[in-house]
Image: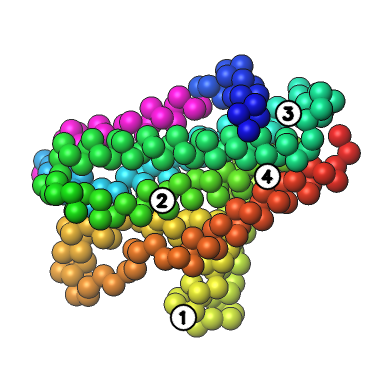
Amino acid sequence: MKRLITIELQKLWKNRASKVLIFTYFILLSFIALLASVNFNIIGVDFRLADMGIFNFPFIWHANTYIAALLKIFLAIVIVSMMANEYTYGTLKQNLIDGMSKKEFVLSKVLTVTLFAFVSTVFVFIMTLILGYSFSSYTEFSIVFSDLQYIGAYFVKMVAFFSFCLFLGIFVKRSAFAIGFIFVWFIAEKIIEGLLYKFVFNSTEALNKVVQFFPLESISNLIKEPISRFQLYKALQTQVAGQVNTKDYDIHWYQIAIVLFWTAFFIYSSYRILKKRDL
């Protein structure tokens, strides 16, 4: 395994575009910390996010993992480009000539995307601890780690999405088309969701029970948006709409199971495509 990962990292390190995207990703993740010190002015009112409780434990685990997940497109580009370069520069064929099996080749890519997800998760974990202990009003051990499941969900989410990107990279072979296909797939899921709501289901609750099995929707559902969980938002919602927010923000075992199924499906499909394709 070490040999396979070393080969893949050497390929990435020699690719300037990949290095730029990877560094950009982690730099942008670091910018989350800058939000704590920025003063915002809205309709003449000055405020800092750090003073509004957004960096309080345990809420910060939810907020940071959600924001960090929005930036995953940078590593997604690296992954699809990684596969496109294999075809463009003939390194895939050369690896097979040198004795690497197609199974080992796919395994090397899976190990690489898992490594990306792991490093990203560790980075977000450390950054969240630093921000939390710097700005949180609650630093008791039991409170600090009470919502740590969001870190685990973040890792699963990253592995699943990167496996999806790997599948598209192998299937499409061209990075630009693969990235475009991600957006096409997303739009297709939303169109199907809209059609199901209009012609099949008569309630959002019934619709959600079905669309939660869609690949991108299931990955997205692992970490739901945290804004409506924020106390200030709840207060405004109660005043304006006169209702209390009852949204479920928990991470359930069946959501993890659905995402793991799609992860396994994309990895296996990647192998089957590569195995049958004439290189």
Residues under numbered marks 4 and 2 in contact, where contact means CB atoms less than 8 Å apart: no
Viewer-proximal residue, 61 or 23?
A: 61
Query: In this picture, is 76 found above or below 3?
Result: below
* Residue carrying label 2: 152
Instruction: Of the two numbered discs 3 and 4 on the same chain, state the one appearing first in sequence.
Output: 3
> With 267 as the anchor, is 57 left or right in this view?
left
Amino acid on which the number 3 mark rests in the picture: Glu
Viewer-proximal residue, 8 or 241?
A: 8
Q: CA distance from mark 3 to mark 4?
A: 14 Å
Which residue lies at the image location 48% right of the left edge and 64% below the top edge?
255
Query: In this picture, is 124 found above or below 62?
Result: above
Which residue lies at the image location 49% right of the left edge and 79% below the top edge?
206
Q: CA distance from mark 2 to mark 1?
A: 31 Å
Q: CA distance from mark 1 to mark 3?
A: 46 Å
Query: In this picture, is 53 found above or below 215?
Result: above
> Which element is circle 3 on?
helix
* Residue carrying label 4: 168
Amino acid on which the number 4 mark rests in the picture: Leu
* Residue carrying label 3: 86
* Residue carrying label 1: 203
Instruction: Of the two numbered discs 4 and 2 on the same chain, state the one appearing first in sequence.
Output: 2
Magenta stretch in the rendered image = 21-45
Residues under numbered marks 3 and 2 in contact, where contact means CB atoms less than 8 Å apart: no
Nearer to us of marks 4 and 2 is 2
* Residue 66 magenta: no
Amino acid on which the number 2 mark rests in the picture: Gly
* Residue 23 magenta: yes
